[in-house]
Image (spheres, helix red, strand yellow):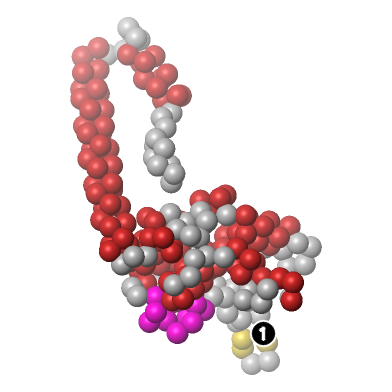
């Protein structure tokens, strides 16, 4: 199995069961060569898929290099060049969005209140927007939340506060939206990601 950080690991349980089956003399010996042949085909397919994935990722990051955006997007701690490239493949040029919130709405990650007459319901995601962009942003949350102290603190606050506490899934959606806003900011301004601004906004913490 290939993890988001690029490391490859196997299942010790499956490996043990495989060797146990190979040494089992009570099984149908004639069928074992066919089973092993199928395993060989599966491993070949896996290697081919991994090679194609590596090629695609190389092409994606190559485009970032050509646009001179790699340094900017990876200045966001925990966001990989591949993750940023996947998002930008769905958004196109971020400068076409007048605000970062417009980009978040395009992804369908901006919550809306459900209103009917005088009734106003709880704000929640509508499911509208671009699913591919929403998925690309969602996938970046796992690595970013672990590596980025700003996102980790935000997630912890949202899931532990006493008032309007969010579920883990809801908090992850908030982090995904934050990543989109920050990605829009660094690209449109040409400035690297700043954890203080990400935490407190454009106003310095001392003046807040």
Residue 7 point in image, percent of width and height: 41, 37
Q: Quadrant of the C terminus?
A: bottom right
Q: Is residue 60 visible?
A: no
Q: Is residue 59 above or below residue 6?
A: below
Residue 158 point in image, percent of width and height: 68, 62
Residue 165 figure quarter: bottom right
User: Is 100 covered by the magenta stretch?
Assistant: yes
Residue 51 point in image, percent of width and height: 24, 42
How many numbered marks have been drawn onto this rendered protein structure? 1
Residue 80 figure quarter: bottom left
Residue at the spot 55% in from the left edge and 67% down from the top edge: 178
Number of residues whose C-alpha sits closer than 10 Å to that of mark 1, classed few (under 14), some (14–19) or many (20 or more): few
Q: Secondary structure at mark 1?
A: strand
Task: Give the residue furthest to the bottom.
Answer: 117
Q: Is residue 118 left or right of residue 20?
A: right
Q: Which residue is mark 1?
A: 120
Q: Is residue 68 visible?
A: yes
Magenta stretch: helix, strand or loop mostly: helix
Q: Is residue 47 left or right of residue 117?
A: left
Q: Is residue 7 above or below residue 139?
A: above
| Of the pair 118 and 191, the residue shown nearer to us | 191
Q: Is residue 65 above or below residue 181?
A: above
| Of the pair 163 and 142, the residue shown nearer to us | 142
């Amino acid at each position: 199995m290939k993890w988001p950080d690029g490391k490859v690991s196997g299942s010790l349980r499956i490996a043990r069961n495989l060797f146990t089956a190979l040494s089992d003399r009570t099984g149908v010996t004639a069928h074992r060569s066919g089973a092993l042949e199928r395993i060989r085909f599966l491993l070949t397919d896996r290697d081919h898929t991994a090679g194609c994935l590596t090629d695609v990722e190389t092409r994606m990051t190559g485009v970032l290099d050509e646009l001179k955006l790699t340094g900017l997007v990876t200045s966001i701690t925990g966001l990989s060049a591949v993750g940023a490239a996947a998002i930008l493949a769905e958004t196109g040029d971020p400068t076409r969005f007048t605000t970062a919130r417009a980009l978040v709405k395009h992804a369908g990650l901006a919550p809306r209140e459900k209103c009917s007459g005088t009734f106003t319901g709880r704000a929640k995601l509508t499911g509208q927007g671009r699913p591919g962009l929403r998925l690309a942003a969602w996938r970046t949350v796992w690595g970013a939340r672990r590596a980025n102290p700003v996102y980790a603190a935000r997630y912890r606050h949202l899931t532990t506060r006493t008032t309007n506490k969010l579920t883990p899934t809801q908090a992850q959606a908030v982090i995904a939206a934050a990543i989109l806003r920050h990605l829009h900011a660094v690209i449109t301004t040409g400035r690297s990601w700043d954890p203080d601004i990400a935490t407190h906004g454009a106003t310095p913490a001392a003046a807040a």
